[in-house]
């Protein structure tokens, strides 16, 4: 019995991975209509941030893992001190649930990341920017940002002054703009014995600051691949981390820079469900269950993953028709999250297509051809 705090699509995909291992997964979520609640036999009906709900979840499971990092560490520590086991451990997650503490950790380990500074919580009429910073700048919420939320592009000094004069209860940070050639991502796992396993590094492509599609494996040089894996291994060891973790990178003229760290399974790793012998969700289930996790390997030459985001309410083609048309594309695997309502920009599912070409250039062309067909049926939000 594995308990999962959260009931969205990542928890749903964990439930599905558990079934393949004969591991029962119980979820803590606020509604029976949430994606994971529809797939599992047992639900603890409490908001995922509710520690009393997590206590009930602990009574039904041998180990608890998380769908996302929006957890109240302080309220869960008493459970851990009373013998409740979490994967990852709360101490390992703590520096990662806040982008500012993430950056402080990276700086302390001399791991390259974009230059940044915290924005004061109090209203300020001025903020000192380093002399070598130029507009635009990127502002990021320290907590809670996802899918383009919690970010704001600051285009000039006027916008910066307006932004810093707004009273906010939430901490934000300001980041020097990074010019990059590629955005990369890797999902890795580390078990209780300290063994690190990595999925193939992927290249991600964004639209309106939300992941649009993913190409696996990334077309990068061997030394870049080694540096990515060295950074991952260093972080996992420093945190004594047990579980699955994802890291997003910028790569370009400034070299390899860590953008963000997610202490969980990640959208960029969804391709692994169809393309690898062990998916990111299988890795999490194995580690939480004490099963020896396989070394993840690609079973095919490459894979394309495309996100399906909700469209506007007056879109002329029905949801049912779009899904039928997608399923009619030869070789396309549709993963539908069964959310109750289509809202513009909401992640509703993803599709995977396994690529046949052996060389990177031909694989990307093949991926772009399939992407064009998919987007003719289901455009970007």
Image (tube, rainbow, N blue to C red):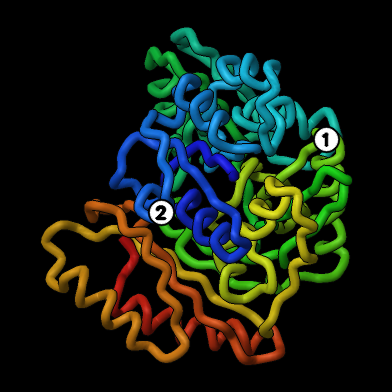
Mark 1 to mark 2 CA distance (whole Å)? 35 Å
Tag 1's secondary structure?
A: loop
Residue lying at the far top in this picture: please name it.
122
Query: On the image, numbered disc 1 is attached to which residue?
Result: 240
Q: Position of residue 333 (x, y in %)?
A: 45, 78
In the rendered image, which quarter contains the C terminus? bottom left
Q: Is residue 155 above or below residue 205?
A: above
Q: Is residue 336 above or below residue 66?
A: below
Task: Tell me which label, 1 or 2, sits earlier in the chain.
Answer: 2
Q: Residues within 10 Å of mark 2 (few under 14, many from 20)?
A: few
**In front of the other: 266 or 251:** 266
Instruction: Please report the residue visible at 30 percent of the width from the left and 43 percent of the height from the top.
Output: 32
Instruction: Please report the residue visible at 61 percent of the width from the left and 91 percent of the height from the top.
Output: 356
Would residue 131 be found to the left or right of residue 126 on screen?
Answer: right
Q: Position of residue 278 (x, y in %)?
A: 68, 67
Query: On the image, numbered disc 2 is attached to which residue?
Result: 208
Number of numbered markers: 2
Instruction: Please report the residue visible at 64 percent of the width from the left and 60 percent of the height from the top.
Output: 282
In the rendered image, which quarter contains the N terminus? top right
Tag 2's secondary structure?
A: loop
**In front of the other: 133 or 317:** 317
Residue 132 shows up from this direction = no
Do labels 1 and 2 touch, CB within 8 Å?
Answer: no
Would residue 198 be found to the left or right of residue 28 on screen?
Answer: right
């Amino acid at each position: 019995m594995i308990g999962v705090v959260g009931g969205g699509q990542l928890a749903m995909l964990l439930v599905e991975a558990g079934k393949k291992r004969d591991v029962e997964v119980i979820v803590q979520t606020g509604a029976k209509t949430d994606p994971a609640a529809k797939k599992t036999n047992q639900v603890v009906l409490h908001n995922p941030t509710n520690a009393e709900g997590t206590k009930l979840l602990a009574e039904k499971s041998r180990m608890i893992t998380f769908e996302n990092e929006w957890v109240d560490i302080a309220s869960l520590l008493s459970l851990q001190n009373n013998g409740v086991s979490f994967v990852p451990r709360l101490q390992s997650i703590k520096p990662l649930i806040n982008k500012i503490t993430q950056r402080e950790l990276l700086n302390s380990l001399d791991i390259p990341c974009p230059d940044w500074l915290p924005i004061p919580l109090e209203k300020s009429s001025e903020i000192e920017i380093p002399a070598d910073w130029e507009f635009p700048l990127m502002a990021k919420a320290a907590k809670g940002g996802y899918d383009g939320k919690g970010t704001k592009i600051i285009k000039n000094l006027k916008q910066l002054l307006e932004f810093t004069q707004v009273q906010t209860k939430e901490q934000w940070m300001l980041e020097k703009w990074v010019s990059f050639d590629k955005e990369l991502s890797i999902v890795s796992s580390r078990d209780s014995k300290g063994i690190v396993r990595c999925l193939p590094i992927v290249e991600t492509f964004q639209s309106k600051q939300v992941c649009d599609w993913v190409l696996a494996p990334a077309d990068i040089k061997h030394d870049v691949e080694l540096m990515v894996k060295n950074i991952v291994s260093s972080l996992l060891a420093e945190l004594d981390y047990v579980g699955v973790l994802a890291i997003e990178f910028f790569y370009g003229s400034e070299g390899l820079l860590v953008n963000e760290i997610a202490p969980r399974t990640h959208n960029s790793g969804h391709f692994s469900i169809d393309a690898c012998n062990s998916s990111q969700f299988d890795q999490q289930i194995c580690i939480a269950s004490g099963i020896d996790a396989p070394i993840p390997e690609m079973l095919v030459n490459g894979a394309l993953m495309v996100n399906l985001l909700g469209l506007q309410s007056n879109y002329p083609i029905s949801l049912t028709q779009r899904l039928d048309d997608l399923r009619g594309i030869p070789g396309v695997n549709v993963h539908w999250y069964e959310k109750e309502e289509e809202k513009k920009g909401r992640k509703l599912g993803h599709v995977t297509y396994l690529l046949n070409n052996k060389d990177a250039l031909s694989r990307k062309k093949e991926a772009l051809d399939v992407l064009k067909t998919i987007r003719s049926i289901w455009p970007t939000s």
